[in-house]
Image: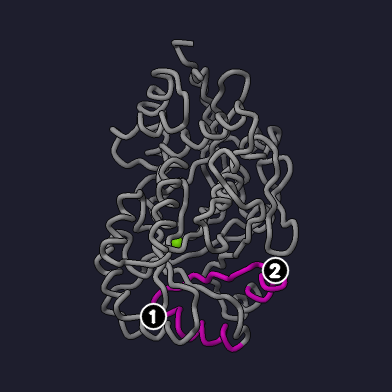
Amino acid sequence: MIIESVELLKVSLPFKETFVSSVSTETTKEFFVVKVVADGAVGYGESGTTNNAFYVEETNYSLSYQVENFLIPLLFQERIDSPLDFAQRVVPIRRNYMAKALLESAVWDLYAKLKGSSLWRTIGGVKDEIEVGVSIGLQSTVDLLLEKVSSAVEQGYRRVKLKIEPGKDLELLRLIRREFPKVPLMVDANGSYSLSEMGTLRRLDDFDLLMIEQPLGPYDLIGHATLAQEISTPICLDEAVCSSSDLEVALALGAGSVVNLKVARVGGISEALKIEKLCRGNGIDLWCGGLYEAGVGRALNLAVASLEGVTLPGDTSPSSRYFERDIIQTPLEFESPGVIKLGDEMGIGVELDEEYLDYLTLEKRIFVNPAW
Ligand code: MG
């Protein structure tokens, strides 16, 4: 296919509630939606970026610069027979994974639509029922946190993930475990601990946690390998794995036994597929995380969660967990408690709510392929 045009929308979408982690507080979501057009079909993509660099180094501003000046010209450069062509074509651009993922995942959606197939089947997915866990941010009071956990359990979420940080960890977990001794529970520190807090980190073993996600700094694979020798709670890597080669280093060091895969963080589906294969081949548990995505990114994550190597419930909650109104026509919902069902609609399987999207749009740019 020859890509005819690209429409880039910057959107501001209000969250239903404020989300707090050890690194950020989010009340609205500013991000990009992209529409990539070829042969009478439109592929959709959604950026993982925000206006700050608290999760990865990229922001909406850096993404916009890369997309406009480098990635769209490469997309237009010559025909694309498979999304893998585009993923290969952008390799010379260093990192900028979220910028690459925005266009690459839209090309995958377009490719699946032109083949007349769902995206999840196109990428080799094997499960049409996706088990869903919930991620609960830091709360202002313990009572509020207990209330949120209780509500998540009632709704049927398959596991509960709590954000922790130094000083908001052991006591909080003790109270949660007292109320919910059997709930499948994990914690995510977003890199807020150091090895000097080994005493606290060791005591996490007391709470029968499924895993601790990214306890140490985002690039500290050696530290995670050291910690893995000291605690029995499995270590899950999130920020530390931005590519399949990062994962190869992590495996060589023994830095973790679980990976939280975010398609946007690793540059798109092509790289996500490599990571899934590596995990499958090395007995590493894998699940699909999220970046508070709206409907397009959420549908993409669900497609990736259908892969065989995805062994644990992810953070792919229904739209209503995050938004009063999503940017897609039919919000993603539970089919049964804790389970989202994938259908046979083409591509990512969702249609944009154009009217609402128009209302949310801060800026719109259209790029037309000069060669078309
Ligand atoms: Mg995380």
> Which residue is label 1 attached to?
232
Q: Residue furthest top?
A: 371
Residue 56 point in image, percent of width and height: 37, 51
At horizontal 47% and vertical 24% (from top left) the residue drawn is 81
Q: Secondary structure at mark 2?
A: loop
- Asked whether residue 185 is in view, the answer is yes
- In the image, the segment drawn in magenta is 149-178
At horizontal 58% and vertical 32% (from top left) the residue drawn is 112
> Which residue is label 2 attached to?
156
At label 1, counting other C-alpha atoms closer than 10 Å, the crowd grade (few under 14, some 14-19, many 20 or more) is some
Is residue 335 covered in magenta? no
Colouring scheme, one of rainbow, by chain, secondary structure, one colour: one colour
The quarter of the picture where residue 241 lies is bottom left
Q: On the rendered structure, is 48 left or right of 219? A: right
Q: On the rendered structure, is 359 left or right of 89? A: right
Q: Quadrant of ligand 1?
A: bottom left
Q: CA distance from mark 1 to mark 2?
A: 28 Å
- Asked whether residue 28 is in view, the answer is no
Residue 21 point in image, percent of width and height: 47, 65
Which numbered disc flags the more N-terminal residue, 1 or 2?
2
Residue 116 shows which numbered tag? none
Residue 65 point in image, percent of width and height: 38, 32
Q: The disc labelled 1 sits on which kind of residue? A: Ser
The quarter of the picture where residue 267 lies is top left
Residue 172 position (above or below residue 242): below
Q: Secondary structure at mark 1?
A: loop
Is residue 175 covered in magenta? yes
Nearest to the observer: residue 75 or residue 361: 75
Nearest to the observer: residue 144 or residue 181: 181
